[in-house]
Amino acid sequence: SGPLKDMDFSVQEGGGPRILHQFTLEPPAVSFRASGEKAGIIDVEPRTGILYINGSLDWETKQVHKLQVESLDESGNIVKGPHAVTIYVEDINDNPPEFDQKRYFGVVRQNSRPGKPFMYVHATDRDDPKTPHAQLSYSILHHFPNPYEEMLFQIDNATGAISPSRTGSYYLDPQKQDTFTLVVFVKDMAGTTTNAFSSSVDVIIVVMESLWKAPPTIHIKENSTQVHPVNITKVRSNEPGVIYDIFEKEKLPRLPFSISENGDIYVTEPLDREEKDTYTFFVVTKDKGGELVDKPLQIHVIVEDINDNPPVCQKDLTVIEVQENEREGSNIGTVFATDMDKKDTLNSRLQFHIQSQEPEFPMKNLFYVQQDTGTLHLAGRSLSKRESAKYFLKVLVTDPDFKTICDVEVHVIDINDQIPIFEKSDYDSMTVAEDIPVGTVILEIQATDGDEPATGSSLIIYQVKEGDPNNAFIIETDSETNRGFVKINKALDFETMPEYNLVINATNPEPLVTGVQYNSSSLTMFKVFVTNVDEPPVFLKPVYKTEVSEDIPVNTLVMMVEANDPEGDSVRIVLKEAQGKYAQHLACVKILFLQNFYLLVEGGSQKSKAFLILQLRDVNDNRPQIATDPTFFCYPVSGGERTLIHAIDADEQFFYSKFTFSLADDMDTRNNWEISKFNATHAYLSPKHANFEEKIYDVPIILNDNGNPPLENKVNLEVSICKCSSENSCF
């Protein structure tokens, strides 16, 4: 309660009668009066001043009620007021959402982009839109039919936009299922509470064939005379406003195709099948942000052939050789030609015809050509070289529109019907020494052949047919004269083969014609006697080499040396010309210290030699020594002086790569001197104090070469303590 004044009240809708406030009377006021938007249920009790609602307010009907309240005296005159009383109606969630249609219908294209809306549903709620009471959330409750585990469609819970899911974009196919029914559910309170109001509606979706699909293979005739560019096909995206583009699969210098903003594809220039017979490229769609909209489409173009290429002879001149005994009908060769037009089409089909023959003697049409293969045959009779050695043919090669002349030259070849005949059937005998050099000509032979000169029918090849099991002889032919030269092919050996009875034959590289055979006229005899020569003995090796240690015991066997005499005589091996300071030891210990010797073998009256190389391997048999000259220190010794000692060893460096230096183990030495290593071969010697007399000291030093085995040596180093001159030397 309280005095009359301007007041605001907030009241939830519904809820029934209620008291909002009580205004108190202030004399001379005796009553109250209310006017304004009372809606028949809002008033002030005149005597008590109670502001009340006798019913339920409805936010959806009226959201604000404005009243004027005043106090009155006994006479009904206004004492105070009027004052504004405003009642704000607060909304409660008392209205379910409602769809704006009882049923929705939509169309989606096959392969549409996932997430791209193709339709919307819309619902409203009469509650206050500024509160969750009217905040709506959409979802798909059911999906009929549902052939897959995942939904084929999806809905935006805030906007009601329906689009294909990723699964739906892939699987939607009007050939399999062209109609779907979705039960779309809408809830208020943003769908976040179970007490929210809800509604549902059916959405009928028809699936239509995708507009975005590759056209069939495109066929374009080559060398078109149309004005370019020429439209060859069209593609269309399922979505409007996309940007079309082409990219090539092959890396070509240029792609003779383009695409318009409407998806029309053009060929931009005439194509040449012989240059390229197929093209493959891709068409893509992009949004304004450059992102791909549809999957790329592959476009395949085949360039169709036209007859635009004449036949081409494979050779400028085709030369065919024919033996003069070839029979009528024989296949003597082929005229080859090609056509660049498409294979296995009439455009590249070639046919052959003989246009002319020169000379036409002894008759016309001596030849014929198979019209589809180009094979040449003898037509009339066998050829004779005496009648004509050559024939010149012009062969006409045609396709349906073009023709070409191919030149053919037929050479008539003499047949091999004559055998080689030796001028002698026996070339008697010859005696040669067994040491005759390889390559020596020992005999010249001659045969003749009656066939055409300078052909395979008349060229003579000589071979030893019998009597030469080791191929000791070879026969070379002078191709101009057919003269044969018998040569030594391998070294002769009297001891293994003292006599050869050779049978030599003469043949042609070209086969003899049927009915003709080689006979005794193509054979000759020749006997070779080999005389013995006293040959020198031979070592098995030209050089003998081995390695031994330098401490090898006397009379140790270091190697075996073998030699033999071809004549079978006994041999004697001796060591000759042992040079150097160790030569005197060679006979007794049979070793060599990095020296070269040779071995002499004697057999019969002949001698041979071989080299013997014996390399001496070092062992650690030398003790280390001091290479430093006697040294000195200037008197008096002040301390800090030192001198460098150098150690050496006569053995190979392998055995003394690291010397050890130490002082002898006696009291006087160790009290006066100290030694420290500098490197592998040097050390420093230093006096340990300054109390040295002016005299010569012998400092015993122990050296160890750390070899295998290690060798040690005790060496006295002479050290002088003396007065030094200005040149820093003793005087």
Image (spheres, rainbow, N blue to C red):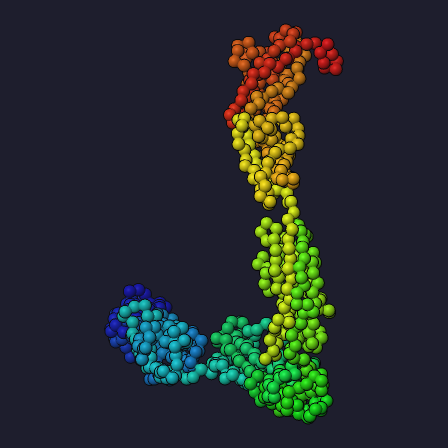
Q: Name, please, the residue furthest toward the right.
A: 726
- Give the mark count: 0
Q: Is residue 350 above or below residue 680?
A: below
Give the position of the C terminus as an image quadrant: top right
Side of 568 relative to 42 (left or right): right
The percent position of residue 235, horizontal first and vertical second, equals 52, 82
Q: Nearer the viewer, residue 267 or 603?
A: 603
To which quarter of the image does residue 376 belong? bottom right
The percent position of residue 435, horizontal first and vertical second, equals 66, 50
Q: Nearer the viewer, residue 356 or 697?
A: 356
To which quarter of the image does residue 515 belong? bottom right
Q: Is residue 696 above or below residue 281?
A: above
Residue at 69% in and 69% down: 423
The percent position of residue 278, horizontal first and vertical second, equals 56, 80
Give the position of the N terminus as an image quadrant: bottom left
Q: Nearer the viewer, residue 207 or 135?
A: 207
Can residue 367 be spotted in the picture? yes
Side of 106 relative to 384 (left or right): left
Can residue 72 be spotted in the picture? no
Q: Name, please, the residue furthest toward the bottom.
A: 364
To which quarter of the image does residue 716 belong? top right
The percent position of residue 605, horizontal first and vertical second, equals 65, 39
Residue at 43% in and 81% down: 109
Residue at 59% in and 33% down: 615
